Image (tube, rainbow, N blue to C red):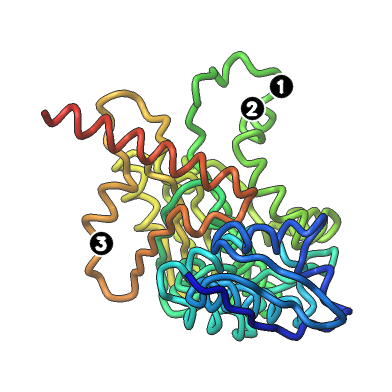
């Protein structure tokens, strides 16, 4: 095997961001494609097999483009770019990098945007449909992106209020044994929604709109008997709805409203022999115009890279168990 040398120009102002702390990012690329690097001046020289160098350069050009836009390169950026190049989808990686599709900014000024193609398709579906189902494992941004879109629509005056809801299903613990009144017992179930609101809207802005009843955070049971007009509604943890609860929720949606239903079909806390309302709804409404279904996967996980490995490991374990049961 003959070795080849190729060079990428990376300016000094971005080199630390591209290389990562203790050269973590560049070493990931080295290991993934069996290449070595030397950095001299503003020249990054790669050595290795010709095909591997081409792949490594595509990854580095991709993350360099992200860095030049002022974004901090994360392990997820590097891992996702490597996976796309390995699959021969590097053109898609460049397209994702080139998109200027910031949804909004957090209170700390951090831009919120789709980081994977699954997330991009999810955000596009939210823009173009009235009801959107977003399914997938933990860490894929289902709820966070939905919250960002809801807050953005509210600030632009596209909707008059935001309604956030979850089924208050017990995950191995009993509500009755928790201290406090009913609201105190329910709040832990809604905490992930509060966290996203605080980060994007700020605690003061959230509290002010909550007092004016422009933002409502409530258990799913509180939706019964209502018609939700001119609202952006997010139903989280929908895998824990029953069939009747999901039907009730879908028939609450009124004029000028948009609803996003998120859930992880692999993490149900329902009683045994109880069908998930999310599973049933995905079969019943999938062909109705104005309703979109977006299925995110482990590739769309944007938390710590270890989360993606855990999700993949559980998927393999569950698949193996299903295969044994069929035998």
Q: Which mark is residue 285?
A: 3
**Numbered disc in front, either 3 or 2:** 3
Earlier in the chain: of badge 3 and badge 2, it is 2
**Where is residue 88, by image quadrant?**
bottom left
Earlier in the chain: of badge 1 and badge 3, it is 1
Mark 3 is surrounded, within 10 Å at the Cα level, by few (under 14), some (14 to 19) or many (20 or more) other residues, namely: few
**Whole-number angstrom distance, CA of label 1 to CA of label 3:** 39 Å
Q: Which residue of the protein is positioned furthest toward the top in this rendering?
A: 177
> Which one is nearer the viewer's eye here, 106 or 238?
106
Using residue 199 as the reference point, say whether residue 86 is left or right of it: left
Mark 2 is surrounded, within 10 Å at the Cα level, by few (under 14), some (14 to 19) or many (20 or more) other residues, namely: some
Task: Residue 73 in the image: state x and y as whole percent.
Answer: 73, 66
> Which one is nearer the viewer's eye here, 4 or 46?
4
Label 1 belongs to which residue?
A: 180
Q: Which residue of the protein is positioned furthest toward the front in this rendering?
A: 2
> Which one is nearer the viewer's eye here, 190 or 29?
29
């Amino acid at each position: 095997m003959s070795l080849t040398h190729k060079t990428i120009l990376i300016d000094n102002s971005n080199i630390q961001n591209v290389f990562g702390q203790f050269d973590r990012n560049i070493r990931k690329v080295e290991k993934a494609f069996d290449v070595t690097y030397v950095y001299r001046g503003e020249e990054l020289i790669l050595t290795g097999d010709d095909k591997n160098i081409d792949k490594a350069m595509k990854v580095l050009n991709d993350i360099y483009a992200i860095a030049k836009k002022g974004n901090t390169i994360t392990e997820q950026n590097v891992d996702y770019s490597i996976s796309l190049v390995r699959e021969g989808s590097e053109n898609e990686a460049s397209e994702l990098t080139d998109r200027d599709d910031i949804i909004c900014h957090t209170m700390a000024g951090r831009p919120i945007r789709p980081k994977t193609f699954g997330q991009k398709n999810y955000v596009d579906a939210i823009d173009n449909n009235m009801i959107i189902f977003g399914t997938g494992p933990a860490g894929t941004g289902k709820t966070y992106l939905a919250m960002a879109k809801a807050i953005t629509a509210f600030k632009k005056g596209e909707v008059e209020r935001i309604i956030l809801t979850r089924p208050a299903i017990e995950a191995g613990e009993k509500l009755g044994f928790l201290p406090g009144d009913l609201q105190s017992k329910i709040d832990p179930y809604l905490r992930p929604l509060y966290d996203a609101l605080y980060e994007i809207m700020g605690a003061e802005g959230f509290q002010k709109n909550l007092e004016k009843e422009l933002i409502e955070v409530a258990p799913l049971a509180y939706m019964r008997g209502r018609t939700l007009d001119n609202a952006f509604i997010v139903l989280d943890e929908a895998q824990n709805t029953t069939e009747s609860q999901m039907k009730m929720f879908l028939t609450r949606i009124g004029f000028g409203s948009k609803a996003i239903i998120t859930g992880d079909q692999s993490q149900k806390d329902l009683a045994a022999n109880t069908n998930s309302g999310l599973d049933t709804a995905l079969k019943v409404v999938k062909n109705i115009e104005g309703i979109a279904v977006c299925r995110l996967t482990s590739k769309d996980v944007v938390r710590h890279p270890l989360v993606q490995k855990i999700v993949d490991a559980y998927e393999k374990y569950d698949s193996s168990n299903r295969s044994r049961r069929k035998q």
